[in-house]
Image (cartoon, helix red, strand yellow):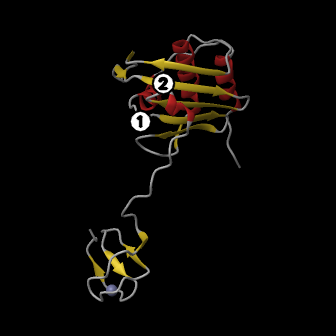
Amino acid sequence: MTLTDEPCFARVLAVLAGERFSFDESASKVMYFMLRDDRGCDAVISARGFEINFGWSYGPHHYVLSTAPPIVSWLLDAAGARGAREVRVAIGPTDLPSVKPCFSWRAPALHVAMVAGLDQVSIRVRDSVAALADPLPAPAPAPHAPGLVEATQPCRHCGQVPDSYRVLRDRSFVCLACGRSQPALP
Ligand SMILES: [Zn+2]
């Protein structure tokens, strides 16, 4: 079962039609996450929720949908847009007002693209216009995530190059040829 919040998403569509919602504390926080860092983000707003992948923390991270109408309001006002389904705006460095208990803060220079469909609104935040063309790259897997890594170096115990090493959480490597472990390889 998918939980949806059609009334809240209808408020987002109302913003696109010209209505405006002002920031509360929660919307201010989510906006801060979206605009605080020039590594940018990809956000998707729909009746199913508000999902964001950040350039500094790939997700998806989920936020309450009620934070979306104020954020879309602010972006459309910043763009001077009304009624457009595709909006691009260069912002900042921009001072954002404080909404207690959030402090006021300054967004770096950013480029924002918003595309509104009937059932979802997607937003990209980037440090350049050119970067707006592509989605954020998915993060590379952590180099020492538990699991198997292809072996390129001989085991210190048996001298063989096994097919792969098993990487443990403490970053030690278990040789699949002889079963003995060794500290992380260089
Ligand atoms: Zn070995």
Residue under label 2: 111
Ligand 1's quadrant is bottom left
4 over 90 or under it: above or below: below
Amino acid type assigned to the residue bearing label 2 in the image: His
163 over 49 or under it: above or below: below
Marker disc for residue 180: none
Callout 1 environment at 10 Å: few (<14), some (14 to 19), or many (20+)?
some
Q: Nearer the viewer, residue 67 or 136?
A: 136
Image location of residue 24, percent across then percent down: 48, 21
Q: Quadrant location of residue 18?
A: top right
Image location of residue 5, percent across then percent down: 67, 34
Residue under label 1: 39
Image location of residue 61, percent across then percent down: 50, 42
Could you say whether the residue bearing mark 1 is in a helix, strand or loop? loop
Residue with the most extreme right position: 118
Q: Nearer the viewer, residue 118 or 127?
A: 127
Q: Quadrant location of residue 183?
A: bottom left
